[in-house]
Image (spheres, helix red, strand yellow):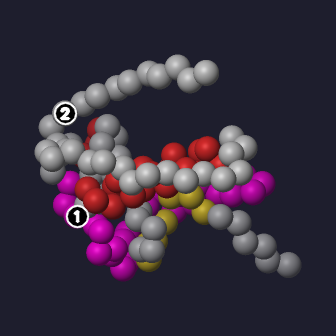
C-alpha cells in the first residue's frame, strides 16, 4: 500500500509552483527535501537583489515579491497562534516598509 506524506522544501520554492526536489530526510509524518529545479514558476517569483542570496540564508524570502512576502509573514504568525491553541485568530494586514531592502533588524520580545 502506498502512502503519501507532506514533503517540505527547505529553501526556494513558492506555494503553487511545480518543482523538482531531492528528498533529504524522511520522518514518520513528513519528509524534507532540497529544491533541484523550478518547473513551473510562480507569478510571485522575482530575482533576488542580493548577490549572495543563495549562499547566505539571511534573506530567505528575497526570491518572492515584497507584497507576497508580507502575506506569507502574516499567515506564518496566524498559523503559529493557532498551533499554540488560539481557536479564533483574526490578524490585520501587515504594514510593509516604503524601502524594504538593505537593512537588518533583529528583535526579542517578551510576551506575558
On whether residue 45 falls in the magenta region, the answer is yes
Image height check: is 41 above or below 67? below
Q: Depth check: 31 or 89 in front?
A: 89
Residue at 26 percent of width and 56 percent of height: 66
Q: Depth check: 55 or 79 in front?
A: 79
Q: Which mark is residue 103?
A: 2
Residue 93 percent location from the top left of the image: 39, 54
Residue at 21 percent of width and 45 percent of height: 97
SS at mark 1 in the image: loop
On whether residue 78 falls in the magenta region, the answer is no
Looking at the rendered structure, the number of numbered marks drawn on it comes to 2
Residue at 28 percent of width and 67 percent of height: 45
Residue found at the far right of this picture = 1
> Could you classify mark 1 by the number of other residues whose Cα lies within 10 Å: few (under 14), some (14-19), or many (20 or more)?
some
Residue 87 showing in the rendered view = yes
SS at mark 2 in the image: loop
Q: Quadrant of the C terminus?
A: top right
Query: Would you say 105 lies left or right of 23 here?
Result: left
Image height check: is 18 above or below 100? below
Image height check: is 1 above or below 60? below
Q: Quadrant of the N terminus?
A: bottom right
Which tag is nearer the camera, tag 2 or tag 1? 2
Region of the chain picked out in magenta, as a range: 22-48
Residue at 72 percent of width and 44 percent of height: 85
Q: Which mark is residue 46?
A: 1
> Could you classify mark 2 by the number of other residues whose Cα lies within 10 Å: few (under 14), some (14-19), or many (20 or more)?
few
Residue 38 percent location from the top left of the image: 36, 71
Amino acid at each position: 500500500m502506498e502512502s503519501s506524506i507532506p514533503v517540505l522544501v527547505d529553501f526556494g520554492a513558492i506555494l503553487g509552483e511545480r518543482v523538482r526536489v531531492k528528498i533529504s530526510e524522511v520522518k514518520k509524518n513528513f519528509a524534507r527535501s532540497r529544491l533541484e529545479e523550478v518547473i513551473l514558476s510562480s507569478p510571485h517569483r522575482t530575482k533576488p537583489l542580493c548577490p549572495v542570496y543563495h549562499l547566505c540564508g539571511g534573506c530567505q524570502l528575497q526570491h518572492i515579491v515584497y507584497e507576497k512576502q508580507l502575506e506569507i509573514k502574516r499567515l506564518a504568525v496566524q498559523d503559529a497562534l493557532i498551533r499554540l491553541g488560539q481557536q479564533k485568530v483574526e490578524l490585520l494586514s501587515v504594514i510593509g516598509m516604503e524601502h524594504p531592502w538593505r537593512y537588518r533588524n533583529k528583535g526579542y520580545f517578551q510576551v506575558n
